[in-house]
Image (spheres, helix red, strand yellow):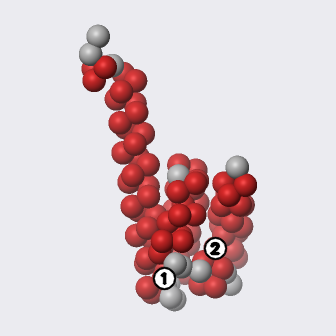
Amino acid sequence: QDIMNTNESAKFVTLKVYNDVAVELSMAVLKYIKKTKNPPEEILYRCVKSLVKFSHIIHKDLLSCIAMIQVDLDELVPGKSTRIDEEMKVLKSKLVSSATS
C-alpha cells in the first residue's frame, strides 16, 4: 500500500499546512501590533481576536512567536476598549494554560 495515497497522510499534510500558516499569520499580526503601536480600535480588536483563534491551533507555538517578535502585548494592547480587554483575557488564559501544559 502506498502511504502517500492514504487519507491519513493527506490529513497530516493538511494539519501541518494549517499550523504553518497559523504561525506565519500570527507573526504578521504581532509585527503589525508592534510596528503601529497605536492602531485603530477596530483593527486592534481584529488582531487580538485572530490571535485568540490562532491560539486554538498553535497554542504552544504562539508563545514562541511572541518571544521571536519581542512584542509586549501587556503594554501595547490593554485599555483601548472593553472588547479588546475581554479578548486579551481569553488570550492570556490560553497562553498561560499552554505554558503550564
User: Residue 39 location in percent, x, y?
Assistant: 49, 85
Q: Look at 66% across and 61% down and name the residue there.
A: 95
Report whether residue 1 is seen.
yes
Q: Nearer the viewer, mark 1 or mark 2?
A: 1
**Which percent across, then down, holds residue 75?**
64, 85
Q: Which mark is residue 84?
A: 2
- Callout 2, which amino acid? Ile
Kind of element beneath mark 2: helix
Left-right relation of 12 to 73: left
**Residue 17 at x, y = what percent?**
36, 45
Extreme-top residue of the structure: 1
Q: Are marks 1 and 2 in contact (CB under 8 Å)?
A: no
Q: Observer-nearest residue: 85 or 13?
A: 13
Query: Type of residue at label 1?
Result: Lys
- The residue that appears at 40% across and 33% down in the rendered structure is 12
Residue 14 appears left or right of 34:
left
> To which residue does mark 1 refer?
34
Q: Residue at x 73, y 55 (%)?
A: 100
For this rendering, which residue is in front, 77 or 11? 11
